[in-house]
Each structure stands twice: as C-alpha cells, then as structure tokens.
Image (cartoon, rainbow, N blue to C red):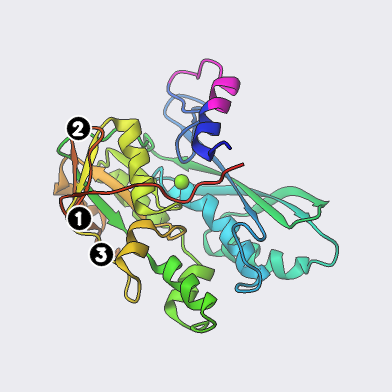
Amino acid sequence: VTGEFSAIADLRRLLAGPCAEGEIWIGDDAAVLQPYPGAWTLLAADTLVAGVHADLALTGLDDMGWKAMVASLSDIAAMGGHAGHALVTVATPPGTDLEMLYSGLAEASREYRCPIVGGDLTSSTELVVTVAVTGWCSGRPVLRNGASPGDSIWMAGRLGASAAGLRLLRGGGGTESDLARAHARPRPLLDAGRAARSAGASAMIDVSDGLLADLSHICEESAVGFRLTQVPAAEGATSQEALRGGEDFALVFCVADRAALADAFDGLPPPVELGECSSDPSERLVDGVTVDTAGWEHHW
Ligand SMILES: [Mg+2]
C-alpha cells in the first residue's frame, strides 16, 4: 500500500527536471511559473470522485460541481493569488444529470470570476470531476517553505465546519444548517490569501486535509515545528473536527512581523493567532501536548 504523499514524492523525482529559476513545479499548493520577469502565473488542479470525495446521497451534483471549482481556487488563494481561468474535465456514467453538475460549476465560476474556458467530457463507470485553474500574483507568491522559528501562526476562515456539517448530514438532519452549508458550499478565501501575502506572510497553505496535517506540510517544507496555543472551532464543531476536519478551505499562514496584518485585513474578518513556529522540526504541540498529525490521505 502506498500513501498519497510518498507517491507524490516518488512521482516528483520521475517528472521534475531541473526547475526553471524562480519557478516552483511540484510540491506547493499551485505551480508557480514566470512567463517573464516580474510576472507570476499560478497553475493548480483538483479532482473529485463521486463516492470518495462526494457522497451524492448527502449532497447534490450541483454541490459537487461547486466544490470541485472551489478546491482548485483555494489552492490559488493559498499562494496569495488572483483567480484566472478554468478548464473542467468530467468523466461520467450514463444518466448523470450534467446540467445539475455544471450549474454548480458555473455558479462558483461566476462568484469567483474564474471563467470556464474549456475542458473535456467523457464516459466512465464513476463520476470524476477535474478542475484545473490558472491564477496570477502581482508579486512573489507565498510558498510553504518560508516559515522561520519564532514566526507566529495565523488562520483565516473557520475550522471544523465542513466536518461538522458532514456529521449532521450523515445523522440525517441539519440540511438547512450553516454547518451543512459549509460542507456543501465551501468558500475559497482569495481575499484573505492576498491580504496575508501583502502583510508579508512567510508561508501559507489551505486547509484541505485538516489543520494539523496541512500545517505539518508547512513545517516539513520550512524545517520548523509548531506550538499551537488556541485552535478555535467553528460554532457547532468539535475540537477534533477543528484540528483534523478536511475541506474547510481555511488558510493557515505564518508571519515574522504581525504589524502589517491589521491594515492588510481591513474590511475582512480578522485572522486568528493559533501559535508559533519552533526551531525543532519534529515538534508538533497543541496546548503543550504532542499530537499525531495524520490527516486525510488516499492509499492504494
Ligand atoms: Mg492546497
């Protein structure tokens, strides 16, 4: 059995030639390309598989379309970027309500001004939706590898809401609740990502697999540890859902100097301080207790 992250590491060796100077090809939220000096193009793709990432007994096809678009846009947000354009590829069993699926894709596309400009449609035994997006940055994008010991760790968005919403839906209730909505219609925090970038964030990632798992990716890439002192859960979510729940698409970022945060987030919900980066790369502390950081990971 191979885990997703070790498989990515193996494939990275196979695929990546010498990366062009100033570019990032594999291993961050989005690839960073420099078409010319001073311009940063972002590329990201995400795939949702019915039955793996979306339980169509609990959420609609339109929600699956929305979420596929949002998952990719969130990776652009995690670089501090602007959304560009999208390609949508759908592999589908016969009889799927494509109009419903594409209505959700189109809604997210309009909401976040990321026009769908092409893609592919093909048949399959399972419904698979892939969204590839471009994005751009007006300055250097925020990577995962720039955090230093002593940087403070911040979160924009909510933690645990999607997992709590899924719990409610599985329990047969709460379909109209704010939490169920957070599960069905998560939002990419593009404004907050750009605010963090302009405030000088040293590292950033979006919470797709769970706070602890995703923050650990920053730690691995930056060679720092973390000490969290508070992890606020969304109202109605448990502390475990806040620490480990996936698909919230909150942003976690680090800053060396917090002075610019208030101005950068003016007009946006203020980010919440979670703790700080430490110099021991193996340290993973929440309230002084070592935690297991495993999050959602595919195995095959
Ligand atoms: Mg990501």
Q: Which mark is residue 143?
A: none
Please state which of the two labelled residues, at mark 1 or mark 3, is closer to the viewer. 3
Question: Which is more N-terminal, label 3 or label 1?
Answer: 3
Badge 3: how crowded within 10 Å, few (<14), some, or many (20+)? Answer: some
Q: Residue at x 53, y 75 (%)?
A: 170
> What segment carries the magenta color?
10-21
From the image, which quarter does the C terminus lie in?
Answer: top right
Front one among 234 and 73: 234
Above or below — where is 222 with respect to 269?
above
Q: What percent of the width, then of the height, locates residue 87?
A: 67, 48
Q: Is residue 164 visible?
A: yes
The residue under label 3 is 232
Front one among 23 and 48: 48
Disc 2 marks a residue whose amino acid type is Asp
Disc 3 marks a residue whose amino acid type is Pro
Front one among 183 and 75: 183
The residue under label 1 is 273
State the CA–CA distance, disc 1 to disc 3: 10 Å
From the image, which quarter does the N terminus lie in?
Answer: top right
